[in-house]
Amino acid sequence: MAVESRYGSGSFGLSDRANRIRIYQTLVVVGLLGTIELLPRLGLVEPTTLIPLTEMLSEIVSLTVSGELTPHIIQTFSAIFAAFALGIATGIPTGVLLWRYDSLKDILDPYLLTYYAIPVFAFYPLLIAIFGLNILPIITIAWLFSVVIIITNTASGLKEIPDIYPEVGRNLNLSSAQMFRHIYLPAATPYVFTGLKLGFIYALIGTVASEFILAENGLGWLISFSYDSFDVQTMYASMLFVILVSLVVNVALIVIERRLYQRART
């Protein structure tokens, strides 16, 4: 029986099972969204606690058309993408170094394994003292959130490559650069992109959470301010907007991953 890969279908049995899983996953999402819509409409939840999903979407449109949401979107996603870009620029090379040099891996491994037990937000007074009360402390916190998962996934992906792959490259007399480009990097792609997807989510969490305490604008600040002002419409609209954008970016990374994988196979 053929085995279904991550990027393509195998046997009919495995394909049918994958389709059933997708159907069940879709039903779970539809059920959750339907519950959010119906609970407040049926009066089972107070409108000050939860509003229907359609009202959240309507409020997003209203805030976007009025321009009220635009400066907050720019503030938040500028920080997110800056932190994510820094995470990629520092995380992937560091992961490669950890894979390449065992001594460096042995030194840093204990710190990387316990990294997320450290309360990164505790450093925000120090970051404010260094950078001032601007967007840089937020970017730094978001980068600290995202970079380690990119490092560890990159190193793990390169480490898990079967020995036969580089052996084939050596038999073809590939240079070190050619080996890395044509063998190591394509083989590690699933791990690397898993790290990137998680890294983006962590950058988003770090940014929005930082804006609760550090910013005077941004979607995190808007959510906090709306909550304190009992403006549930704006609060839920802002929350939903952040979720929707994170889903779009995650899907985009999946598409890029699959295209790179398919290109590497041709």
Image (spheres, grey):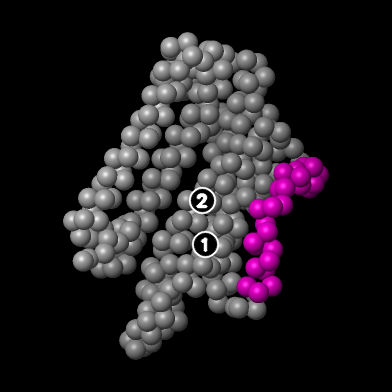
Prevailing secondary structure of the magenta residues: helix
Identity of the residue drawn at 42% across and 23% down:
35
Q: Position of residue 225 (x, y in %)?
A: 65, 22
105 with respect to 263 (left or right): right
Which label number is shown at residue 153? 1
Return the residue at label 2.
198
Query: Which one is in front, 177 or 206?
Result: 206
Q: Quadrant of residue 54?
A: top left
Residue at the image point whose x is 64% and y is 61% from the top = 113
Residue at horizontal 27 percent and vertical 61 percent from the top: 4
Q: Is residue 203 left or right of residue 157?
A: right
Report how far apart the C-alphas of labels 1 and 2 lie in the structure. 10 Å
Are the residues flagged by discs 1 and 2 in contact, CB closer than 8 Å? yes
The local crowd at label 1, few if under 14, some if 14 to 19, many if 20 or more residues have their Cα within 10 Å, is: many
Region of the chain picked out in magenta, as a range: 105-130
For badge 1, the amino acid type reads Asn
Res 110 → quadrant: bottom right
Residue 221's place in the image compared with 21, above or below, is: above
Above or below residue 142? Residue 176 is: below
Q: Amino acid at mark 2?
A: Leu
- In the orientation shown, which residue stands out farthest toward the left? 12
Give the image location of residue 68, x and y in percent: 53, 21
